[in-house]
Image (tube, rainbow, N blue to C red):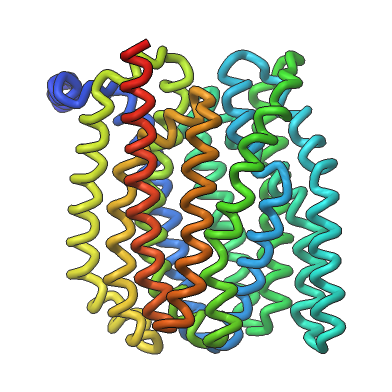
């Protein structure tokens, strides 16, 4: 065992010379990130099978529509607070966790009124199921987002093992188990939505309190955390609308059943992004500690590494997709052609190092430009394409937008690097 460990260490150090990246750090934290995502993906996969076999396409489509509306309205909260907390805690302001928890609840009052307004709208239009669902979303979502701040604390402390076990595994498996149990009893979207939010709040509170008991955060508070999170949240408003607009357009212009097909087509590609996003969480603390000059060293190697990984994942999935759907989702065979095209969006992971750099170094301008430009384009392109080509239009639009997003972030990073070099 020691021999294998030493050989692995030497290999990582050798690879480090080419990637200009701390491969030992990435491998140690990356193990938990990848392992937890595999567990979560497996659990999500089993839940998807349950949805495919026990819930009608119409009911599942309505369930996903409610979640997309919740996502859109959620953009009017301090959704950038987790990133701000991570940065503050990494700098020693551990008491920011408690401070941010209650600030988030306070700032969610607008979200509550928006969901209440949406609820009234659906009640007046005779859709009581959607009306009650919106009330559930408004009541529980603010507390769910506040409890999840414990993960930002764990990442800032570089406790990737607990982050993986608490946030990724337990935080996902418990709600999935509860939803699975609910599916066996009913397929009504209102009950499924209620179980989804209530179970997430319960497990979130449990893990938040456990994290506090273990670490006992100091009382140092970074009151500036709200200011920075407002910037990040403002940046995310258009992005939140854009990222959920496809669900709303499909539901209203094509129907609930096609929305179910689209979500099954997007489900596995979305899950495949999980390990990559977790690795981004590993990069963030390192980028926070290092100078901009140090980060730029080897950044292009990181881009190349991410792109090569994306290509491998895409090719493997395109080959495997028909077998996966024929075996596990026979009711959604018509989603195969869509999911193969949607997998191309995974190539956008190439720009993740630049995205993490912008957040870690508070490059507000670049974040505003990237999010505003791409969000406006996404909303416009999605609207035009869904009217033009229906479900195919949305699929193509999603891939195009992801590629444009990646290209723009890399362009902004390269331009910023050149300007800094001149200065």
- Residue situated in front as seen by the camera: 420 or 149: 420
Q: How far across and how far down the image is residue 337, in percent?
A: 28, 79
Against 71, residue 362 (above or below) is: above
Q: Name the image quarter holding residue 40.
A: bottom left
Residue 232: x and y in percent read: 61, 37
Quarter of the figure that contains the N terminus: top left
Give the quadrant of residue 270.
bottom left
Residue 25, above or below 267: above
Residue at x 39% of width, y 16% of height: 292
Q: Is residue 368 above or below residue 5?
A: below
Compared across the picture, whether 305 is left or right of 239 comes to left
For residue 150, say whether it is visible: no
| Residue 335 in view of the camera | yes
Which residue is depicted at the point 81% across and 42% down?
A: 107
The number of discs equals 0
Q: Position of residue 210 (x, y in %)?
A: 68, 35
Residue at (55%, 55%) from the top-left corner? 172
- Residue beneath the point at 48% across and 20% down: 288
Residue 96 located left or right of residue 249: right
């Amino acid at each position: 065992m020691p021999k294998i460990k030493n050989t692995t260490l030497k290999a990582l150090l050798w690879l480090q010379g080419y990637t200009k990246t701390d491969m030992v750090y990435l491998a140690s934290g990356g193990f938990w990130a990848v392992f937890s995502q595999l567990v979560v993906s497996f659990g999500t996969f089993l839940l998807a099978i349950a949805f495919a076999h026990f819930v009608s396409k119409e009911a599942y489509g309505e369930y996903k529509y409610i979640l997309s509306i919740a996502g859109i309205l959620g953009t009017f909260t301090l959704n950038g607070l987790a990133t701000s907390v991570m940065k503050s805690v990494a700098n020693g302001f551990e008491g920011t966790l408690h401070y941010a928890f209650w600030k988030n609840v306070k700032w969610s009052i607008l979200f509550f009124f928006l969901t209440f307004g949406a609820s009234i709208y659906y009640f007046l239009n005779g859709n009581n199921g959607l009306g009650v669902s919106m009330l559930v979303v408004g009541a529980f979502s603010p507390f769910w987002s506040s409890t999840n701040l414990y993960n930002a604390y764990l990442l800032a402390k570089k406790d990737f093992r607990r982050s993986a076990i608490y946030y990724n595994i337990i935080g996902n498996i418990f709600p999935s188990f509860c939803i699975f149990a609910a599916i066996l009893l009913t397929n009504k979207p209102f009950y499924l939505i209620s179980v989804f939010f209530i179970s997430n709040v319960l497990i979130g509170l449990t893990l938040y309190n456990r994290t506090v008991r273990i670490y006992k955060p100091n009382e140092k508070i970074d009151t500036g955390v709200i200011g920075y999170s407002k910037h990040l949240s403002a940046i995310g408003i258009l992005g939140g609308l854009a990222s959920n607009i496809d669900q709303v357009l499909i539901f209203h212009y094509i129907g609930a059943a096609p929305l179910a097909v689209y979500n099954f087509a997007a489900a596995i590609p979305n899950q495949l992004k999980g390990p990559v996003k977790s690795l981004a969480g590993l990069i963030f603390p390192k980028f926070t500690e290092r100078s901009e000059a140090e980060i730029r060293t080897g950044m292009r190697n990181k881009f190349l590494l991410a792109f090569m990984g994306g290509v491998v994942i895409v090719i493997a999935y395109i080959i495997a997709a028909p077998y996966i759907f024929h075996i596990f989702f026979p009711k959604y065979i018509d989603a195969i052609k869509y999911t193969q095209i949607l997998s191309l969006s995974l190539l956008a992971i190439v720009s993740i190092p630049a995205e993490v750099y912008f957040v870690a170094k508070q490059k507000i301008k670049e974040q505003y430009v990237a999010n505003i430009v791409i969000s406006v384009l996404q909303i416009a392109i999605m609207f035009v394409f869904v009217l033009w080509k229906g479900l195919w239009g949305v699929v193509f639009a999603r891939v195009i937008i992801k590629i444009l997003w990646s290209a723009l972030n890399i362009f902004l990073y390269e331009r910023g690097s050149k300007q800094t070099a001149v200065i």
